[in-house]
């Protein structure tokens, strides 16, 4: 029987374990942490439950195709995807229903519905042209490039708007400053800078507004729990608290892995580890590492998990409080590796749809700002200063005293993201998409010179975020199928 080893049990690793086990392969997962899920974890304290990482699910079908019927959990399509608060007092409800959304934008910002509809149609075209080759497939295989659909994409390359930044594209298509800021924000969904990332990333707004944004009943952590149950049901063996130290390779073939306790042989090794860390420690390779280091790291996050006394009907499940100078905020984030004194603040309150997440009369606030990758900043100082700035900003914009409502608190900073998941510099999505070539430079899901070695997860093709990590596992499954033939 073929033996596969998966290194890491983030969503990419879990999905790969299920797919390979279904193929009749014996699968062992080695995970350095004491539990599964990587970034998709939860926190429980003082009667509050928090989704610790992701707070929104797109393309849920990629998840459900992995699960037996009884393990599929109900998901709710969010009616209001995000409630936006602007410094000038404007509030916008980003309805998932496009007609309602365009009506809201027309009423609040005086932008005709036709304009936004035209924008969303262009984003849909980007999705149609890129999804097979850049999201669900691997352009690193020549045969995937040499087919009619890929040729069509290449011939229509200008429709991908790859030569404009997302901000330039949004400005020329939408014009209105606040609407531009709203659509610029999608760059942050993979840790990038809207003033640098190519406008191809407008595809993310299509995923959210046209294909839908979802929340699992019971919280995002359901995703990890169900995938883990499915993998165990298929006979996958998990070894928690066991960090893989090295991958053993010789004569162009993978032989297995090295743990502190010794060598474990395998025919196939799938790494779900940040690719930067893979080439610096698991399979040291100066040339590949230096190529990865040339790519700018994606942003990280600073998160305050606040157990709040009181109910806040003025807030929705997902809320954004914009900064007054978005360009300056990103300059500080990417060019200066600093946190702005006026950061855009994101608040996710799962207890609004899942009341068990907070005690009666309370809410669980996941308060997040984009933070720079960790390059040795003084995080204690940043945390203290930013906490104060966030509180002052929210109190001003909501016209409410909040400081005394915080009944319980935990904090997650970039150095801890690294400690918990091995993501180098605490960057959430590996390298950023701040250059036109970023998606081409992202590591492939395989090595053409090493048989049996594969890569999944947010730091390799097609990139970060739940659906893309799930896609990486699907691509690897296809490659393993070919390999075993
Ligand atoms: C705060 C935050 C908010 C986010 N919001 C969203 C969102 O709303 N929607 C969305 O789609 N995505 C979101 N994401 C991104 C998403 O969570 C990630 O892209 C995805 O979960 C990454 O999965 P992964 O497979 O790359 O593995 P990871 O989650 O990075 O896990 C890697 C695993 O490998 C293990 N490991 C590392 N080194 C070793 C070793 N040597 N040996 C053994 N094990 C090892 C680690 O312990 C870890 O468990 C968010 C992420 C964060 C942090």
Image (cartoon, rainbow, N blue to C red):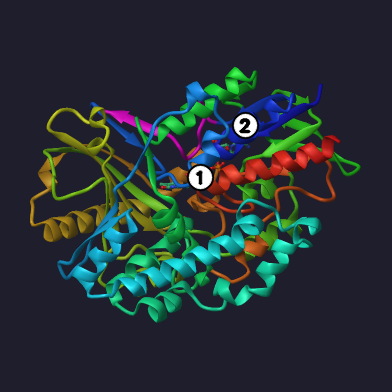
- Residue 466 is labelled as 1
Residue 8 seen in this snapshot: no
The magenta stretch spans which residues? 33-45
Q: Earlier in the sequence, mark 2 or mark 1?
A: 2
Q: How many marks?
A: 2
Ligand 1 within 8 angstroms of badge 2 C-beta: yes
Say which residue label 2 marks. 243
- Viewport quadrant of the C terminus: top right
Q: Quadrant of the N terminus?
A: top right
CB-based contact (under 8 Å), mark 2 and mark 1: no
State the SS at label 1. helix
Quadrant in which residue 152 is drawn: bottom right
**Splitting the image into 4 quarters, where does residue 412 fall?**
top left
- Is 471 on the left-hand or right-hand side of 325? right
Note whether 36 is above or below 85 in the view shown.
above
| Rendered location of residue 118, percent (x, y) | 41, 72
Q: Residue 361 in the image: state x and y as whole percent.
A: 12, 32
Q: Nearer the viewer, residue 67 or 89?
A: 67
Where is residue 318 drawn, in percent x and y? 28, 49
**Residue 36 sits inside the magenta stretch:** yes
Numbered mark located on residue 144 in the image: none
Q: Is residue 362 magenta?
A: no
Whole-percent x, y for residue 161 in the image: 54, 75
Q: Secondary structure at mark 2?
A: loop
- At a point 88% along the width and 40% down the height, the residue shown is 250
Label 1 CB less than 8 angstroms from ligand 1:
yes
């Amino acid at each position: 029987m073929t033996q596969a080893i998966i290194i890491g049990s983030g969503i990419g690793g879990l999905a790969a374990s299920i797919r390979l086990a279904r193929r009749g392969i014996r699968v062992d997962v080695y995970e350095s942490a004491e539990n599964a899920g990587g970034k998709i974890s939860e926190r429980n304290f003082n009667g509050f439950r928090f989704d610790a990482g992701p707070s929104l699910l797109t393309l849920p079908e990629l998840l459900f195709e992995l699960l037996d019927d009884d393990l599929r959990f109900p998901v709710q399509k969010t009616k209001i995807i995000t409630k936006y608060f602007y410094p000038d007092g404007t509030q916008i409800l980003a309805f998932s229903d496009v007609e309602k959304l365009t009506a809201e934008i027309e009423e609040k910002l005086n932008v005709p519905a036709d304009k936004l509809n035209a924008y969303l149609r262009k984003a849909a075209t980007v999705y149609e042209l890129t999804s097979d080759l850049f999201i669900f497939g691997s352009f690193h295989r020549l045969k995937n490039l040499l087919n009619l659909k890929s040729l069509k994409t290449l011939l229509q390359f200008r429709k991908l708007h790859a030569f404009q930044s997302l901000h330039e594209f949004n400005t020329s298509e939408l014009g209105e400053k606040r609407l531009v800021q709203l659509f610029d924000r999608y760059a942050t969904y993979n840790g990038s800078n809207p003033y640098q990332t190519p406008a191809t990333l407008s595809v993310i707004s299509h995923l959210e507004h046209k294909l839908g944004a979802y929340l699992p009943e019971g919280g995002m952590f359901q995703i990890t729990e169900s995938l883990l149950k499915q993998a165990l049901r298929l006979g996958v063996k998990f070894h928690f608290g066991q960090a893989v130290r090295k991958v053993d390779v010789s004569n162009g073939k993978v032989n297995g892995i090295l743990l502190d306790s010794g060598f474990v042989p395998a025919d196939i090794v799938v790494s779900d580890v940040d690719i930067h860390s893979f080439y610096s420690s698991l399979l040291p390779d100066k040339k590949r590492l230096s190529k990865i280091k040339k790519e700018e790291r994606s942003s990280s996050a600073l998160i305050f998990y606040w157990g709040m006394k009181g109910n806040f009907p003025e807030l929705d499940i997902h809320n954004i409080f914009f900064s007054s100078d978005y360009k300056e905020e990103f300059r500080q984030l990417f060019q200066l590796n600093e946190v702005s004194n006026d950061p855009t603040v994101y608040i996710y309150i799962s207890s609004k749809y899942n009341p068990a997440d907070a005690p009666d009369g309370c809410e669980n606030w996941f308060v997040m700002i984009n933070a720079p990758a960790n390059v040795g900043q003084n995080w204690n100082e940043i945390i203290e200063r930013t906490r104060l700035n966030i509180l002052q900003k929210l109190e001003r914009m909501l016209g409410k005293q909040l400081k005394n409502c915080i009944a319980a608190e935990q904090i997650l900073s970039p150095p801890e993201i690294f400690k918990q998941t091995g993501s180098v510099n605490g960057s959430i999505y590996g390298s950023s998409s701040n250059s036109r070539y970023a998606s081409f430079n992202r590591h492939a899901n395989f090595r053409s010179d090493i048989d049996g070695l594969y890569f999944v997860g947010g730091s390799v093709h097609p990139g970060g975020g739940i659906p893309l990590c799930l896609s990486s596992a699907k691509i690897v499954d296809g490659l393993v199928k070919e390999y075993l033939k």
